[in-house]
Image (cartoon, grey):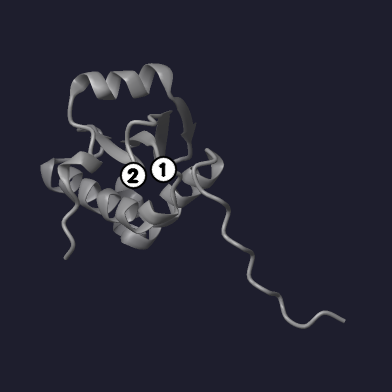
Amino acid sequence: MKRRTSTSRLSRSAEFERVYRQGRSTANRHLVLYAFPNPAVQTPRLGLSVSRKVGGAVERNRVKRLLREAFAQAGSDLSPGHDLVVVARPPIGELVEREGLAGVVASLSELTVKSGLRAAPAAPASGPSA
């Protein structure tokens, strides 16, 4: 398992505040994504916020682990030089139970495309054209 360096995460309260106050937000049913351009960083940095409304400590830690994994999968496709904060909404617990990592990846991908941090995936070919 590849370990991400601590520089790829937001850890200070001031960093979170800057992203919340000056960044742009995009949301869906399960997540809210705040993005703030930061040319000082090469790779996107991630901060997570998972409240107790999501569930107990075990559920919250599972959600955070899956969000970090989904971010790691999408990381190479994301625009460089951004600080991101992902806020988990309470319905994410149901999504994790139902679909696991695949559901979290789909939800995060939807937001990254919607916010312009990543190009939309190409539509699959629908067979031979007449």
Toward the right, the furthest residue is 130
Left or right side of 17 for 113: right
Mark 1 Cα shell of 10 Å, populated few (<14), some (14-19), many (≥20): some
Q: What element carries label 2?
A: loop
| Disc assigned to residue 43 | 2
Which quadrant would residue 1 be assigned to in this image? bottom left
In the rendered view, tell whether residue 26 sits above or below residue 126.
Answer: above
Camera-side residue: 123 or 32?
123
Q: Which of 23 and 67 is in front in this view?
A: 23
Residue in the image at 34% along x and 41% along y: 42
Q: In this view, does 13 lie above or below 87?
A: above
In the rendered structure, which amino acid carries the disc numbered 1? Pro
Quarter of the figure with the C terminus: bottom right
Per the image, the residue denoted by label 1 is 80
Residue that protrudes farthest toward the left in the picture: 57
CA gap between label 2 and label 1 equals 5 Å
Question: Observer-nearest residue: 37 or 100?
Answer: 37
**Within the image, what quadrant is residue 3 found in?**
bottom left
Where is residue 121? Give x, y as percent.
57, 59
